[in-house]
Amino acid sequence: MAPSALQLSTSPHFSSSHSSFFDIGGFTITRQSKVFLPSRRASLICRSSSTEKTGTPTYTTKVPRNANIAKLNAGYLFPEINRRKSVHMSKYPDAQVISLGVGDTTEPIPEVISSAMAMRSHELSTFEGYSGYGDGQGDKKLRAAIASTYYGDLGLEESDVFISDGAKCDISRLQLLFGANVRIAVQDPTYPAYVDSGVIMGQTGTFQKDVEKYGNIEYMRCSPDNDFFPDLSTVPRTDIIFFCSPNNPTGSTASREQLTQLVKFAKENGSIIIYDSAYAMYISDDSPRSIFEIPGAKEVALEISSFSKYAGFTGVRLGWTAIPKELLFSDGLPVAKDFNRIVSTCFNGASNVAQAGGLACFSAEGLKAMGDVVGFYKENTDIIVDTFTSLGFDVYGGKNAPYVWVHFPGRSSWDVFAEILEKAHVVTTPGSGFGPGGEGFVRVSGFGHRGNVLEASKRLKQLFK
Amino acid sequence: MAPSALQLSTSPHFSSSHSSFFDIGGFTITRQSKVFLPSRRASLICRSSSTEKTGTPTYTTKVPRNANIAKLNAGYLFPEINRRKSVHMSKYPDAQVISLGVGDTTEPIPEVISSAMAMRSHELSTFEGYSGYGDGQGDKKLRAAIASTYYGDLGLEESDVFISDGAKCDISRLQLLFGANVRIAVQDPTYPAYVDSGVIMGQTGTFQKDVEKYGNIEYMRCSPDNDFFPDLSTVPRTDIIFFCSPNNPTGSTASREQLTQLVKFAKENGSIIIYDSAYAMYISDDSPRSIFEIPGAKEVALEISSFSKYAGFTGVRLGWTAIPKELLFSDGLPVAKDFNRIVSTCFNGASNVAQAGGLACFSAEGLKAMGDVVGFYKENTDIIVDTFTSLGFDVYGGKNAPYVWVHFPGRSSWDVFAEILEKAHVVTTPGSGFGPGGEGFVRVSGFGHRGNVLEASKRLKQLFK
């Protein structure tokens, strides 16, 4: 922790020399007159206000709390999981807690990618290599690499691609794009950010405890009974359809035929599909990796994706959204044009260092390295699938996704979560955290060090034998 | 540009080896059965849909364009400036165009800071140094450094600080926090992101061409006549008051007495001040560097700031927002608690590499280095102030800010902008782009290489002599 400003400012050495802002390096010499010399009480940068007692505050502003945020019925799922993990760890300080809960990557970033970020960092301290604000839509080279190397001959162009600081961040920017007056549909169970960001935007009614749903959101039930693909004949028309495949949390992947149905459904209804393909590279069979593999999709879909689960960029923060020129609002204006206005007003582009890493991901070596990362986590997932299968559970997902969806019929997800944490010191994610359709299931993530996954497997076999 | 996927997939070398996703590094050997072998027509990652002709699209969805975005009367200011610059450059391909327009940093990032980013990048490729998702609120060490080293003894705690990917991005997240039903006040002229993000959130009426204002926003006129500080006796109560000091664009800085008035005004009205201190380190006199230097401010204000103009992080993307525990909604709930929900739902933290750079900024060497950067740009600003002063113009700002605000009485800002660009090949920013109060002024930025600033000065003296 940095020394307190008071310490600094009361030290004659510091307040008169190199770490005070009031003589800015050599600058004092040339511009003495403009230099403010701090008083003894001055802090390093800011000056102290009269020493206020900060007891229980009594003053409240007249600004009302945002009623939409008040609708949120619980904390965002994953911080809540981490909170419970911490509580458990303080209860069992000696326990080796293994987290297969939050889908957080654990393996190092391949050197070919991290070196590119290091090199870009160094370049930024040179006159030749320095750059300031980048294109708000993202580095042209990176957008071109995604259009050509990721989307291949699907006909997307560099100008259709928007670089983001992660899929979750773009989900909220897309909510800002479409606004409060659209109605959304989500898979049930679903990644919570779609629903929660819609609640925050004011698209929904209040949370209805009896059905565990928010008003004015269409929950498209996905269960083993329907092969985790909604029965579209029963789904009413909505403006927006969030659809994630490979799915988080169920790990299921929609087939070409199913996605063809989905595109047809959207086209008949004039809906826009927000297709989340953040796990597409985990697909091992011939399921589509992009919604744009489906003919006609460009007129009804945009696609969000992320480097997080391919290159270990969960902390580096990089993703993209592809919006084809063919995607138009009812008035014929292109959706991409308004999204460009959103990113230039509400965002300023992803970090240039992260984007340099992203570009390296699409080099031949980077592609190979990402493949290795994906392959490693897929092997973890196999171990988890085999573990629960051998214990006689009904196990779903896993094949084309880093998530395994385990059925505990008739049991509460949170109870199962608590039992596994309490008895095996393994963190999972309760299915009901993803929506009412997840009740009775637990999501087990394939992200983890191999040793931890094997140890978790051993403990689970012990617990459920 | 990366080779097209089609080229790759039709190349026996590539499709059978190290740059295909379908054999993911060594993984094919162990899990052959799960490996999908691409057909000749398959692209590297995605498979081609039937070759669709993408002529003029005829299909439109039934999704209405967001009416709030339709209200925006022009493109975001700075992309528009860059667009005009490009047009000029294609008109005069041989001209040495100098940009003193968009406030974009030009000097290299100090090595002590870039090295920290490079080191963090390398660490991420090691088992010991790798980390995945960070704390959505930001790295604890960085938050602690900001609380102690930046805010000194003002009584802010690490838990009051939220690390962002830049002040502009947090402005939009703050708009999501407060929602569509608040009324905002802004300085006029003002940084456009406050107004435009409010329009997008649906807080405003339509743009009224006659007055050049949006309905339901309170524009607080700041001009030479009132020392660029609004006459608060004429300002009606609003929920939110955006206040930027040192000000962008006028370069004026509010005094301790003026900010004491502002805090008193907010307290009487129960308003919340969103105080933008992104240029605080440019202050050379004893003007407050933080709103929290004013007694009682913690109950009515939050503060946004940025590393962009101190460490050259315009492209690296890092900033922070400080929300004291004392700042409460009308129902007594803390504002910081809801903002935490916003960042955990709509954001996932700034890049870990950028945050490592931010931490280095607050080392003794980092503080000294930032001081040098600030000092350099302040010297540029002096040159610009002297230039226009010598030409007999009324010149404002500059002293405590990197912006010089030059008065061209009776002339249109855009005309002056066009004349300076056309005749001197120097890009400035038209004052009217910052609001009706900016008409007749031009903002000249102190960000630039010294040689360019001197050359621009020479050309301007030629033009206006």
Image (spheres, coloured by chain):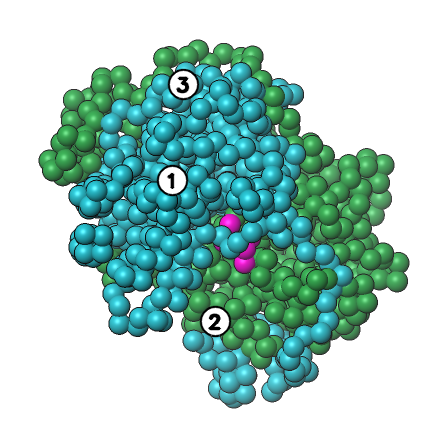
Chain colours: A cyan, B green
Q: Amino acid at mark 1?
A: Asn
Amino acid type indicated by mark 2: Ala
Distance from the alpha carbon under mark 1 to that under mark 3: 20 Å
Q: Earlier in the sequence, mark 1 or mark 3?
A: 1
**Relative to A118, B285 lies left or right:** right
Q: What is the secondary structure assignment of the residue under circle 3? A: helix
Q: Which residues are magenta?
A: B340-345
Asked if labels 3 and 2 share a chain, the reply is no
Q: Which residue is mark 3?
A: A260
Q: Position of residue B347 (x, y in %)?
A: 50, 50
Which residue does the numbered mark 2 point to in the structure image?
B145
Badge 1 vs badge 3, beta-carbon distance below 8 Å: no
Distance from Cα at disc 3 to Cα at disc 2? 53 Å
Q: Residue B344 colored magenta?
A: yes
Within 10 angstroms of label 3, few (less than 14), some, or many (20 or more) residues?
A: some
- Displayed quadrant of residue A383: top left
Q: Element under label 1?
A: loop
